[in-house]
Amino acid sequence: MVAGWLDRFDGSLAPCNQIMRLANRVALITGGTSGIGEATSVLFAKEGAKVAVTGRNDERGQAVTEQILRNGGRAIFIHTDVRKAEDCRRAVEQTLITFGRLDILFNNAGVFYAHTALDCSEEEWDLQVDINLKGTFLMSKFALPGMIAQGSGVIINNSSGWGIVGGDSAVAYCASKGGVVLLTKAMAIDHGRQGIRVNCICPGDVDTPMLPEDARLRGLDWNSYLAGCANRPLGRIGTADEIAKATLFLASDDSSFMTGTALVVDGGGTAD
Amino acid sequence: MGSTPNSSGLLKGKVILITGGASGIGRATALLFAREGAAVMIADVNGEAGQAVAQEIVGNGGRALFEKADVTRAADCERILNRVSRELGPIHVLFNNAGIIRRASILELSEEDWDRVMAVNVKSIFVLSRQVIPLMAHAGGGSIINMASGWGLAGGPRAAAYCASKGAVVLLTKAMAIDHGPQNIRVNCICPGDTDTNMLRNEAQQLGQSTDRFLAEAARRPLGRVGKPDEIAQAALYLASDASSFVTGTALVVDGGGLAGSI
């Protein structure tokens, strides 16, 4: 089924028999320096998007953009702390200056600290809610005007399976991710008529640096922790690339009638 | 035909059975799956329309067969699957798409109509899937996609049997996902909002409303329009393909924001 690919070949290094699903799109990915954000940045670039990678770790951010550039894609890194409105405003502004437009915003930046309400300090509460939830609000606030002006745009928020069901020792994380699910629905209602789709993804446990960090904080042996994570219908944790592909589906026109939804990608973890 | 006019070959080499594939979402999905490289078996009670879809696919250079069948009957399902294995090979994907709607409250609904809605929308999934799952397990895995509805997650007026049946599909999906995940069989459902098909127009007739008024009402959702069959087919494509390899037991809502909340 590759008839006609030659007609569409534009000299880029993408696989010739594959359609670039994000050709001519500009994407901004927060927390793009590692894990799901890194995998999504690389996948989106491979699918033809120009990618603005943001994050707090400059070294890792540069490594991600260099990888994309080496593969023949286009990317910039913008140092951004999504807790700060001024950083968010500047991230959107620099994306517009560099690439001329913004089509896709992936609010992916997130942190997790395992605590019950009793042992979660106020600082740790604020840190998780401000990055996971307020950062999504701030980035969307600054990205929306341009999207509204061009009459199209896609926002994808990274929630969690724990934004739908509760989890143990994760009060601030659950609260922030539940907030992301309903913020997603509220923004979908407000901006659907302006041509903007807003959805979230709810990953289950995924092979990212966040997992071993959680095991360490909980004082659990990595192998027994991992076995617990894999205890779901598909019998394994997810890969960052599998979450990136769900994000790609929501970012592309393939999901043109989807808005206000929570796409669960968790190997069946929340099916019961 | 939708957003990606050309193929990415996402289903290259896959053998797929689509029930209710003669019209609407089933037809759009059969055409899309074939374009993505799958060999498609279309099953439907409507022989003429089903044959036409298969011919259209073959005319486009794709691979498709049609079998006239009532998938609420185990014997019909067996006949379909025998033909699939004989003429196409091991089955990788099952799209349980066949469905009907009766717009009636329980006071208006006959027992016969209740039974028929339940048989087509729910029992067919049970009857067909229990024959397909051993085949998929033997081949190392597969993907089953069930057609639910936005009205499988929230209630709607004068659609009691339909809501009951689609609610059952959502939870049957999750139960099957739990049981057959270890066999590497993923089971998910799609919850479309109102989509521009004959079934939607038929609802206006059942309710004695003008089609125009009914469709205008159906468009009242954040995206301000009803869906296109091809947009639901794209969601089915995601769930059928390896791009969703970590997705099981989920209800994929494709409804223009209809369920996000009140506008």
Image (cartoon, coloured by chain):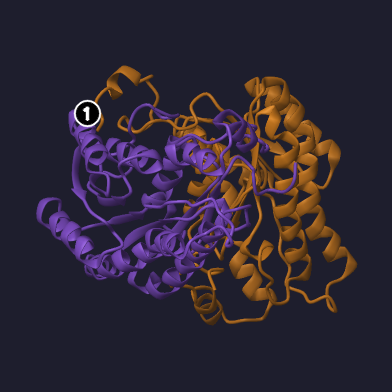
Chain colours: A orange, B purple
Q: Quadrant of the N terminus of chain B?
A: top left
In the displayed structure, A208 sits above or below A92; it is below
Q: Is residue A69 visible?
A: yes
Instruction: Give the crowd class for mark 1: few <14, some 14-19, many >=20 residues within 10 Å.
Output: few
Residue type pointed to by label 1: Asn
Q: Is residue B160 left or right of residue B16?
A: right
Nearest the camera: A5 or A67? A5
Q: Secondary structure at mark 1?
A: loop
Q: Of all residues shown, which one is farthest toward the right? A: A122
Residue B182 occupies which quadrant of the picture?
A: bottom left
Left or right: A130 as drawn, with respect to A41: right
Q: Nearer the viewer, residue A68 or B158?
A: B158
Picture residue at 58% right of the left edge, 28% below the top = B212
- What is the count of numbered marks? 1
Residue A170 at what x, y percent from top left?
73, 71
Q: Residue at x 65, y 46 (%)?
A: A260
- Residue A59 occupies quadrant: top right
Residue A6 pos. (x, y %): 28, 21
Q: Position of residue A62 (x, y in %)?
A: 61, 40
Relative to the observer, which residue lies in front, B14 or B260?
B260
Farthest-out residue, left: B86
Q: Does the image show residue A81?
A: no
Q: Is residue A144 left or right of residue B235?
A: right
Residue A261 screen position, x and y as percent: 62, 49
Name the chain letter of the residue that bears numbered label 1: B
Residue that badge 1 annotates: B60
